[in-house]
């Protein structure tokens, strides 16, 4: 049975979507059907298609009572909208169906696990969100909430853990047919922890362990955890709130964290050996991963950040897009990311230049556009003669530009979207430390109308930022203070 609330949302989104022109959306990134989108949810492969759900408020381009939007794709790049899957329509989720995940059950049904939110009046008159874990079962189109919801609530929490910050279950099926999930939680020390739960059938859940504790090292509460093995290592991803900056690695506010380490089966705990940011740009948060049928670990994130949402004018009909799906691997103890290989099928109009000297500003015939895949190698004249600065400027016209610039002496790469039409005093620039100072720098820049994703040195680091510059601003140019030499291979994407 589909509730009235969900029926209304479905009716609304169908009508409202028609008001948004296709050409005003990104071409190969999933954007919200209408209204507001945040985290990716329920990402997975189900009955021959990739399914991607998302945190969704259809009725305005601002965050509101959370629904789950829904889309499917066969190549992770072209998405088709399906009707909204979940609406806040039960006593345990009346204030929102928050983030969660999905798997296929052995009998072919699709199981969604999400956080139900209901406000509770406190003694001082204020309201707090009580968060519990809930299930819904469906066929890839319609979902029915489980009669015994919620399946996990405060009763299972370790002593001192908060029932107000207990969210974002990520579940998976083990080789032996049993189920596990990790959930973000605020611990007694006011910081974050990731809890591990197990189940025989996907419906009855037991608390297992504190898989990992933040101990106030990386921000406070950890949102949207994900846990998987990759290249013989164990990886824990989380999106910490309230970060303090650490050098060029982490920035203030909501950030992303990748912990690489090992899992101890006896104690059901994870020990981290290395840590790093997942994305070094401005807009990337709450990623979720899947294992594709051909064995790739693919991650997709919300291409925005809570701290910079005001970049968008509220009167616009839509706000929110996902990042490119990225293939993950571990090399030299670090997380590497590459755009999914499916992207190569979208390439056409190849334009190539070799050994072009750049000194001052250079534009190259055929190099422009807002839906672009561009590979660039930048070399100094010699190791002794480094240029001061090299920049690529894009989404550019007389008025606007966004840029990526590299300073080899400082070994820093900077993304700057200050001149992209934003009217808000928010963060518009961010830098990251790049290891290859005096050697060739390799960049792959992917533009899709309103976003730039920069894969640095074969994906050793990534910087992501959105820019809502008018799309007629489509020039690209190169600049060097000093002498640089570049190789460029550029494709249009569609
Ligand atoms: C992360 C998050 C989640 C929560 C959802 C609410 O961006 O805050 O922790 O489930 O968004 O929309």
Image (cartoon, rainbow, N blue to C red):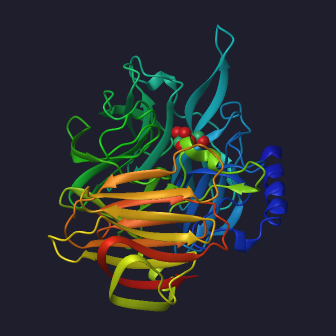
Q: Residue at x 83, y 45 (%)?
A: 4
Q: Regarding ligand 1, which quadrant of the image does it lie in?
A: top right
Q: Quadrant of residue 470?
A: bottom right
Q: Is residue 170 left or right of residue 337?
A: right
Q: Quadrant of residue 316?
A: bottom right
In the rendered image of this protein, does residue 421 appear above or below residue 470? above
Q: How many marks?
A: 0
In the rendered image of this protein, does residue 151 appear above or below residue 385? above
Measured from the top left, where is residue 206 in percent x and y?
41, 33
Measured from the top left, where is residue 389 in percent x and y?
33, 65
Q: Residue at x 77, y 56 (%)?
A: 317
Q: Residue at x 22, y 34 (%)?
A: 267
Residue nearest the viewer, comparing 242 with 151: 242
Residue nearest the viewer, comparing 435 with 400: 400
Residue nearest the viewer, comparing 317 with 422: 422
Q: If the image is split into quadrants, where does the C terminus sit?
A: bottom right
Measured from the top left, where is residue 418 in percent x and y?
55, 55
Q: Is residue 90 visible?
A: yes
Q: Is residue 251 left or right of residue 379?
A: right
Q: Residue pushed farthest top? A: 123
In the rendered image of this protein, does residue 54 appear above or below residue 485? above
Residue nearest the viewer, comparing 79 with 388: 388
Q: Is residue 433 left or right of residue 65?
A: left
In the rendered image of this protein, does residue 201 appear above or below residue 221? below
Q: Is residue 264 visible?
A: no
Measured from the top left, where is residue 454 in percent x and y?
42, 66
């Amino acid at each position: 049975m589909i509730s009235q609330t969900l029926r209304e949302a479905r009716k609304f989104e169908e009508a409202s979507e028609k008001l948004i022109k296709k050409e005003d959306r990104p071409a190969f990134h999933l954007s919200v059907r209408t209204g507001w989108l945040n985290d990716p949810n329920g990402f997975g492969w189900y009955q021959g298609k990739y399914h991607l759900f998302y945190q969704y408020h259809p009725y305005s381009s601002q965050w509101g009572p959370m629904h789950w939007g829904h889309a499917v794709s066969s190549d992770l790049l072209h998405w088709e909208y399906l009707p909204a899957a979940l609406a806040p329509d039960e006593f345990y989720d009346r204030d929102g169906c928050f983030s969660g995940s999905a798997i296929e059950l052995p009998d072919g049904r699709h199981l969604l696990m999400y956080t139900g939110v209901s406000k509770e009046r406190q003694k001082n008159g204020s309201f707090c969100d009580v968060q519990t874990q809930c299930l819904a079962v469906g066929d890839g189109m319609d979902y029915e909430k489980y009669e015994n919801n919620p399946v996990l609530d405060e009763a299972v929490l370790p002593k001192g853990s908060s029932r107000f910050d207990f969210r974002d279950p990520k579940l998976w099926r083990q080789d032996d047919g049993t189920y596990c999930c990790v959930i973000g939680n605020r611990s007694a020390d006011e910081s974050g922890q990731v809890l591990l739960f197990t189940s025989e059938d996907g419906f009855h859940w037991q608390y297992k362990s504190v898989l990992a504790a933040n101990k106030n090292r990386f921000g406070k509460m950890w949102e949207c955890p994900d846990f998987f093995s990759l290249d013989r290592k164990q990886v824990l991803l989380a999106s910490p709130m309230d970060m303090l900056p650490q050098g060029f690695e982490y920035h203030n506010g909501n950030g992303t964290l990748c912990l690489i380490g090992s899992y101890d089966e006896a104690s059901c705990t994870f020990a981290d050996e290395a840590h790093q940011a997942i994305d070094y740009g401005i807009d990337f948060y709450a990623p979720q991963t899947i294992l594709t049928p051909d064995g790739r670990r693919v991650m997709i994130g919300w291409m925005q950040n809570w701290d910079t949402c005001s970049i968008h004018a509220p009167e616009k009909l839509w706000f929110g897009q996902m990042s490119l799906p990225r293939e993950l691997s571990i090399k030299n103890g670090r997380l590497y990311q590459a755009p999914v290989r499916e992207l190569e099928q979208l390439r056409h109009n190849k334009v190539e230049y070799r050994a072009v000297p750049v000194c001052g500003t250079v534009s190259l015939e055929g190099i422009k556009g807002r839906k672009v895949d561009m590979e660039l190698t930048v070399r100094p004249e010699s190791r002794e003669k480094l240029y001061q600065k090299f920049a690529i400027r894009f989404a550019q016209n007389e008025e606007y530009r966004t840029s990526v610039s590299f300073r080899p002496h400082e070994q820093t790469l900077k993304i700057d979207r200050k001149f992209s039409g934003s009217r808000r005093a928010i963060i518009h620039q961010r830098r990251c430390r790049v290891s290859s100072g005096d050697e060739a720098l390799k960049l792959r820049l992917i533009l899709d109308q309103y976003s730039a994703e920069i894969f640095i040195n074969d994906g050793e680091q990534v910087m992501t930022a959105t820019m809502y510059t008018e799309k007629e601003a489509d020039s690209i140019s190169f600049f060097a203070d000093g002498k640089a030499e570049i190789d460029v291979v550029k494709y249009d994407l569609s």
